[in-house]
């Protein structure tokens, strides 16, 4: 049986319909968190007794495996994910924290673009770039149109990267379920 997050379609829709950088980064995190959860569930849920009394308490959000990075470290240690997949998820966790603490994260922020470009799926396919020189001299409506197009490009790139990571997580663990 293939592994997939319980609400895969809804999660990817929320990501692709996000209206700003904060929503986009938080949705990207949610997709990856749910995917990691689905992978762990497929590995550890072998029988009803184990599920009810042993595994479920470990995997709750307040359990010892509630944090996505701890879950990913466990998967990395078990050989369930590659180091590259772990590193990419770690970047999205960092970006989620920025989105939670900064009210106006922007895809023109060099720090955000730097982190996004560290994601292998983004770096290898379409590195993200922005410079103030690109909008210099544009009138206000042209500048707004350019910035909206840039946002759409970054959001689409994140959707592709997260989808790739999600499929990689599931594929890397398909044989263990």
Image: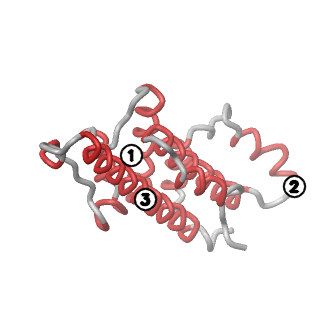
**Vertical side of 4 occupied by 69: above or below:** above
Q: Specify the label residue 171 is tagged with.
A: none
- Closest to the observer: 151 or 55? 151
- Which element carries disc 3, helix, strand or loop? helix
Q: How is the image coloured?
A: secondary structure
Mark 2 or mark 1: which is in front? 1
Q: Nearer the viewer, mark 1 or mark 3?
A: 3
Q: Quick check: 3 above or below 6?
A: below
* Towards the viewer: 155 or 116: 155
Quarter of the picture holding the C terminus: bottom right
Quick one: label 1 or label 3, which is nearer the N terminus? 1
Disc 2 and disc 3: Cα gap in Å? 40 Å
Per the image, the residue denoted by label 3 is 156
Pointer 2: what residue? Answer: 48
SS assignment at label 1:
helix
Foreground of the two, 115 or 78: 115
């Amino acid at each position: 049986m293939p592994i997939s997050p319980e609400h895969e379609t809804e999660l990817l829709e929320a990501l692709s319909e996000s209206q700003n950088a904060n929503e986009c980064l938080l949705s990207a995190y949610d997709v990856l968190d749910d995917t990691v959860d689905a992978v762990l569930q497929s590995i550890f849920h072998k029988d009803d007794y184990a599920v009810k009394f042993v595994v479920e308490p470990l995997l709750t959000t307040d359990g010892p495996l509630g944090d996505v990075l701890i879950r990913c470290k466990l998967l990395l240690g078990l050989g369930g994910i590659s180091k590259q997949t772990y590193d990419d998820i770690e970047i999205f966790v960092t970006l989620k924290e920025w989105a939670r603490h900064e009210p106006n994260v922007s895809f023109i922020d060099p720090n955000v673009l730097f982190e996004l470009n560290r994601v292998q799926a983004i770096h290898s396919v379409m590195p993200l770039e922005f410079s103030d020189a690109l909008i210099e001299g544009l009138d206000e409506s042209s500048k707004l149109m350019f910035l909206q197009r840039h946002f759409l490009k970054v959001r689409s790139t994140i959707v592709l990267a997260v989808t790739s990571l999600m499929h990689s997580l599931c594929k890397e663990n398909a044989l263990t379920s």
